[in-house]
Amino acid sequence: GFEPLCCAALEHNSQAHERLADVKLEAVRDNNQQLVSEILDSLTGLSSRDASAEELANILQEPHFKSLIEAHDKVAAKCYEMPPSKVNSNAMATGPLIPADAVRMIGIQKKAGEPLVS
């Protein structure tokens, strides 16, 4: 019944995890802020005539999206800075550090017929 199916799924999950652990992910580019700026320049004339272009321009100008792109560019450029801490510098010196090759992935999915911004 259920037990062999569960064990098979766990085994498959374990094998998939092992294969993914060996993959080294690298950012495609680290200057996406410039790319977004160029896209916005391209959308300038289209926004008044095309609702999708206007929606995209609005999304690209949102503060949260700008911060996301900025954070991506910093991680892609491996530009890691430890914020100065005068409150508890001893704890920071002995605490674990994030490895330089750490990767955090996020995604945005758009459903057909629904706007990204509500």
Image (cartoon, grey):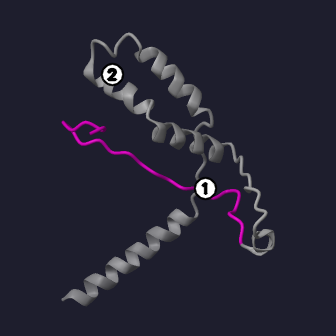
- Measured as percent of width and height from the top left, residue 108 is found at 38, 45
- Measured as percent of width and height from the top left, residue 10 is found at 37, 79
Quadrant in which the N terminus is drawn: bottom left
Please, what is the three-letter code of the amino acid marked with disc 1? Lys
Residue at (34%, 16%) from the top-left corner? Answer: 47
Disc 2 or 1, which lies upstream in sequence? Answer: 1
User: Would you say residue 111 sits in the magenta stretch?
Assistant: yes
Which labelled disc corresponds to residue 24? 1
Quadrant in which the C terminus is drawn: top left
Element type where label 2 sits in the image: helix
Q: In this view, does 44 lie above or below 104?
A: above
Classed neighbour count for the residue bearing mark 2: other residues with Cα under 10 Å, few (<14), some (14–19), many (≥20): some
- Measured as percent of width and height from the top left, residue 99 is found at 69, 62
Residue at (67%, 57%) from the top-left corner? Answer: 101
**66 with respect to 82 (left or right):** left
- Measured as percent of width and height from the top left, residue 27 is found at 59, 44
Q: Nearer the viewer, residue 21 or 71?
A: 71
* Residue 16 picture quarter: bottom left
Which labelled disc corresponds to residue 53? 2
Residue at (78%, 75%) from the top-left corner? Answer: 94
Number of the front mark, 2 or 1: 2
Element type where label 1 sits in the image: loop
The answer to whether the residue labelled 2 contacts the one labelled 1, judged by CB atoms less than 8 Å apart, is: no
Q: How many numbered marks are there?
A: 2
Which segment is the magenta one? Answer: 96-118
